[in-house]
Image: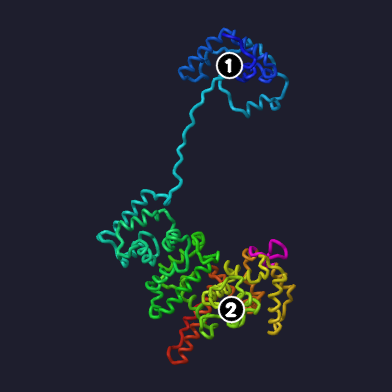
Amino acid sequence: MEGAVSMSDVAAFQPEALQLPEVSPLALKANPFLAEQLFSQWLSLPDTPRLVKSLLSAAKTGESLNAVGSSSSTNAGSGSSIPSMFPSGCTPPLSPRSVSGSPRAVKQRAGPSFLGSPLKVISEPVREVIPQFYFKNGRLPPAETRERCLFDIDQHFYGHMDGLQQNEFKSVAKDICKLPSFFSTILFRRIDANSVGFVTRDQFIDYWVKGNFLTMDLVTQIYIILKQPDREYLTQEDFRPILREILATHPGLEFLQSTPEFQERYAETVIYRIFHYVNRSGTGRLTLKELKRSNLVAAMHQVDEEEDINKVLRYFSYEHFYVIYCKFWELDTDHDFLIDKENLIRYGNHALTYRIVDRVFSQVARKFRSKVEGKMGYEDFVYFILSEEDKSSEPGIEFWFNCIDLDGNGVLTSNEMQFFYEEQLHRMECMAQEPVLFEDILCQIIDMIGPETEGLVTLRDMKRTKLAAHVFNILFNLNKFIAFESRDPFLIRQERENPTLTEWDRFAHREYIRLSMEDDAEDVSNGSGDVWDESLEAPF
């Protein structure tokens, strides 16, 4: 070999590259001159020149360096292609050291495996193809779904070269889009943006198919159809088109067509009920997330399938509207469509305390939409009566919790509860009822709620218990407090037989029967009607 190996080459030489299992790499690093001597001795071995030539030839032709000489190596049993410098059977013994404590053993386990030669071949990295995961207009529908939809579209538009008119579009909305039939008008107008009066096949395909409605869930489809294009939320006005369509087409509301003023009140009440239960943020801007969490779309489909609108208890029942409106009319003595404190204190036969009525009018639970200071309008009353008669619902719990939370810190203390119960105690004494001391009541309340922190009741605690309504009635509704303490076993059995009915459903049904009886009795006394039918007293 030409020249001598310099000290810098020896210092930079990797002991592992020699691949000598008989010699510890630590010993070679500790004594660089030993590595130089071993390297010189290796070069003088008879098999070394042949092996070096084989490696060079393999490197030039691009063959794997690990395989060259592996079969002809004198040290094949060790798995190395480099000839050993020690004769067979003359390997020096290793120092008596445990395997687990050997740095060499640790390095072999943790480090990467070395190639059979100091010359390493670096392979090109494999290029992985990442499938498309973002679609600007939404993921494309499966080809089978698209083709089936196009076939249905061709069937509905067959023979209508100029397109379909609005009165012919209902089958498209119901059969192809799977929407409630009363969405046909608003869907038609969304597509017929220029108000031509016709929707062609190509226009419908551009809007529904190319607009990727096929990949959306039903709630998202309804949300996009109802909302304004430049908004990301729904307002009360966005629901008016479908309410007008329901009033015009639903068989259960035909009798209202001769009284347009009550049609308007019915539509307003339905919208107020929707926002009371669905718009949990209370902003008046109903989001897609809130809509998906609600049962509104299911109720819409029930309206489309059920001829009796009163069987749709969620949001759309006419009987529920009738109860709400009549209760408001009873309190609004001057019929200016506004209610003040003195009017509201008469609600439920003076069931509420003055202190809780003051808190309602302080608007801590909900800001009034009324433009007249110190008075609530019809929309405000709808929110109030739904909260009062359905205290176990999430909106009702939040409403009354905020009223009782005097300092607004999100926690009800015994002092705050005592403040409201003091008036209840005074009223019990005036009614010759046996008074219950607050200390006893507080123990009862704590047992019913079971707060996470002793002595402090949070909104989370109230939502977790099933007796939230009774807790509120103890504090500010004496009539319901006494009624609960002396409950009729017959009413308890009825509640167990109809567990799906809410407190509001039961109240509205009872009140509707009472109000209808009063109307019939008034008609009889005026000689303008027949005696009311006993079938009105349907068991509940």
Left or right position of 383 against 180: right
Residue 194 picture location, percent across and down: 33, 63
Along the viewing direction, whichever of 518 and 215 lies nearer the viewer: 215
Residue 244 appears left or right of 92 = left
Q: Which mark is residue 105?
A: none
As drawn, the label of residue 77 is 1
Q: Amino acid at mark 1?
A: Gly
Q: Magenta stretch: give its range.
A: 447-460
Quick one: SS at disc 2? Answer: loop
Q: Which residue is mark 2?
A: 374
Residue 488 position within the rendered picture, expressed as x and y whole percent measured from the top left: 61, 77
In front of the other: label 1 or label 2?
2
Is residue 174 something that shows in the picture? no
Note whether 116 is above or below 352 in the view shown: above
Q: Position of residue 231 (x, y in %)?
A: 46, 61
The residue at 66%/77% (across/down) is: 355
In the image, residue 185 sits, relative to residue 14, either above or below, namely below
Find residue 243 and report its horizontal and vertical position in percent: 42, 70
Q: Is residue 307 magenta?
A: no
User: Is residue 373 shown left or right of residue 240?
Assistant: right
Q: Secondary structure at mark 1?
A: helix
